[in-house]
Image (cartoon, helix red, strand yellow):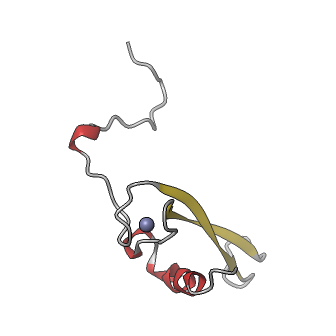
Amino acid sequence: MSLTNDPTQVSVNLEAAESLRCDECNSAIFKQRFILRKVSALLSPTGQEMVVPVNVMQCAECTHINEGFVPAAVWEDIQNGESNPEC
Ligand SMILES: [Zn+2]
């Protein structure tokens, strides 16, 4: 008997899966963060200005974000943020 009828639930063999680790401190624990990109009305599919959240995973230990974890388009935003820890 299956525990779920959710078709989006994918069965993964974790034994065969590799843990990704932080490039800086080698931690395997990450937390979810968002970068918000504002889309101008000219480029928006709705014709109105909109905010699009971009999901990124940040190291829970040292707050580093691996470059491979984010789309190239927002990588510059992350680097700017990392250089400003007061923000
Ligand atoms: Zn780290």
Q: Quadrant of the C terminus?
A: bottom right
Observer-nearest of 75 and 50:
75
Residue 4 appears at what percent x and percent y?
Answer: 47, 23
In the image as oriented, which residue stretches furthest toward the top? 1
Q: Is residue 62 above or below residue 16?
A: below
Residue 60 appears at what percent x and percent y?
Answer: 51, 59
Q: In the image, 82: left or right of 66?
A: right
Q: How many marks?
A: 0
Q: In the image, 64: left or right of 49?
A: left
Split into quadrants, the picture shows ligand 1 in the one at bottom left
Residue 28 appears at what percent x and percent y?
Answer: 38, 55
Identify which residue is drawn at 71% across, 85% down. Answer: 42
Q: In the image, 2: left or right of 60?
A: left
Observer-nearest of 45 and 29:
29
Residue 86 appears at what percent x and percent y?
Answer: 69, 81
Q: Quadrant of the N terminus?
A: top left
Q: Is residue 77 above or below residue 56?
A: below
Identify which residue is drawn at 38% across, 59% down. Answer: 27
Observer-nearest of 39 and 13:
13
Identify which residue is drawn at 61% across, 66% down. Answer: 34
In the image as oriented, which residue stretches furthest toward the right? 48
